[in-house]
Amino acid sequence: MKREAQNLLQKVDEKSEKCTVGCPILDRNLNGGIPTKSITEVVGESGSGKTQICLQLVLSAQLPPSHGGLNGSSLYIYTEYPFPIRRLKQLSLSLLSSHPNHLLSSSDPLSRIILRGISSAENFVELLPDIELCLRYWKSRLLPIRVIVVDSIAALFRSEFGNCCFDLKRRSSLFFKISGGLKLLAERFGLVVVVTNQVVDFIEGNESVRIGNFSELCSSGRRVCPALGISWANCVNSRIFLSKDQTGIKITRFSSLLFAPHLPLSSSQFVITEKGLFGVENV
Ligand SMILES: Nc1ncnc2c1ncn2[C@@H]1O[C@H](COP(=O)(O)OP(=O)(O)OP(=O)(O)O)[C@@H](O)[C@H]1O
C-alpha cells in the first residue's frame, strides 16, 4: 500500500514541470529541479549560498525546457539591501558563455528579471494584487514570468514582532496571507516559487521545531533550526537546507533536501565559484 502511494507520488512528480537550478547534481537531488505550482524554501545561515542559488535559478529559468529551464522571466523580491546586482551580472555572463545558443539572442538576461525591494510583511501582502497584475500583463520579449523569488522571508519578521500573544497571532496571520497568496499564484500561473529563510540556534528541549527527516541540523559547528518556527514550516511544500563549515580558508558546503511531498531526503556537497554554485560528485 505504502509502495503504491509512493509510486503514485512519483508519477505525479514526473509529470510536474521543474526548473533547473543550473547544476545537474543539485537538480538530481530534486528529481530534475525545483517544481512549479508549489513553494520551495531554501534555508541556511548567512553566507551559506541562499542568494547564490536564487540568482542562478532566475537566470537558468530563461533557458528552454530542453535545457531544464522554463523559457521564463522572473520576479525577484528582495528584503535585504543592497541587492547583489554585480553578482547577478557576473552570473549572467557565466550563463551566456555556457549557453551561447540557448538564450534569446542579442538580449540581456538581466532584462528578464524584475527586481523589487520590500520592507515589511504588510508591504508584501499589499503587493500581492500588483504581482498578480504583473504576472498577467508583463511580458519581456515574449517570456512570461515563471519564477518568483522572495529573498528573504525571515528578514520581514526579524525585529518588529515580539513574543506576546497578539504579535504571535499577527505574525501567523501574515505567514498564511503571504504563503496562501503565493500558492494561489503558483497554481494559477504555473510558477516556481522560492523563498529563503534564515536559521537560529537550536534551543535544547525545543524538539517541536524539528520538521523533516534529519534528526538535527548543523552549520559552522552549531546546532541550528530554521527561523520562523512551526507555523511557517507548514506554509512551505519543500525545504532545502544549505550548510557550511570552514577550516582555515577551506569552506565545505552541503545542500540537503529536508522534506518534499514527493522525494526522499538527499544531500550533496557543493562549491561556489565565480561562475556560480555547483554540486561536487563523490567526495
Ligand atoms: N564571485 C564569487 N566567487 C566565489 N564565491 C562567491 C562569489 N560570490 C559569492 N561567493 C560566496 O557566496 C557566499 C555568499 O552567499 P550568499 O550571498 O548566497 O549567502 P546567503 O546565504 O544568501 O547569506 P545571507 O543570509 O547573509 O544573505 C559568500 O560568502 C562567498 O563565499
Image (cartoon, rainbow, N blue to C red):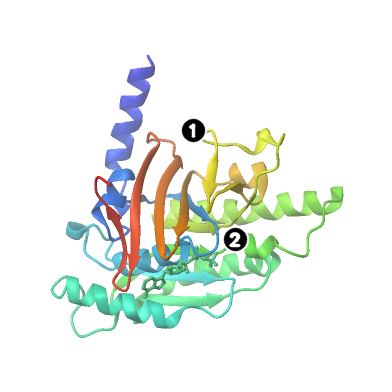
Labelled disc at residue 25: none
Q: Which residue is mark 1?
A: 213
Quarter in which the N terminus is drawn: top left
* Chain-order first, disc 2 or disc 1: 2
Q: Is residue 79 left or right of residue 105?
A: right
Report the mark closest to the observer, 2 or 1: 1
The quadrant where residue 4 appears? top left
User: Residue 135 placed where, x, y %?
Assistant: 44, 67
Comparing 117 with 180, the one in front is 117
User: Residue 231 placed where, x, y %?
Assistant: 66, 43
> Which residue corresponds to the image point at 58% horizontal and 66% vertical from the top-left?
129
Distance from Cα at disc 2 to Cα at disc 1: 23 Å
Residue located farthest toward the top when viewing the structure as drawn: 1
> Which residue corresponds to the image point at 27% horizontal and 39% vertical from the top-left?
14
Q: Is residue 242 left or right of residue 163?
A: left
**Vertical position of residue 30 compared to residue 44: above or below:** above
Comparing 271 with 51, the one in front is 271
> Element type at marker 2?
loop
| Amino acid type, label 1 | Asn
Q: Which residue is mark 2?
A: 153
| Amino acid type, label 2 | Ile
Residue 202 seen in the current view: yes
User: Residue 256 placed where, x, y %?
Assistant: 42, 45
Category of crowding for the residue at label 1, using alpha-carbon neighbours closer than 10 angstroms: few (below 14), some (14–19), many (at least 20): few
**Vertical position of residue 241 compared to residue 53: above or below:** above
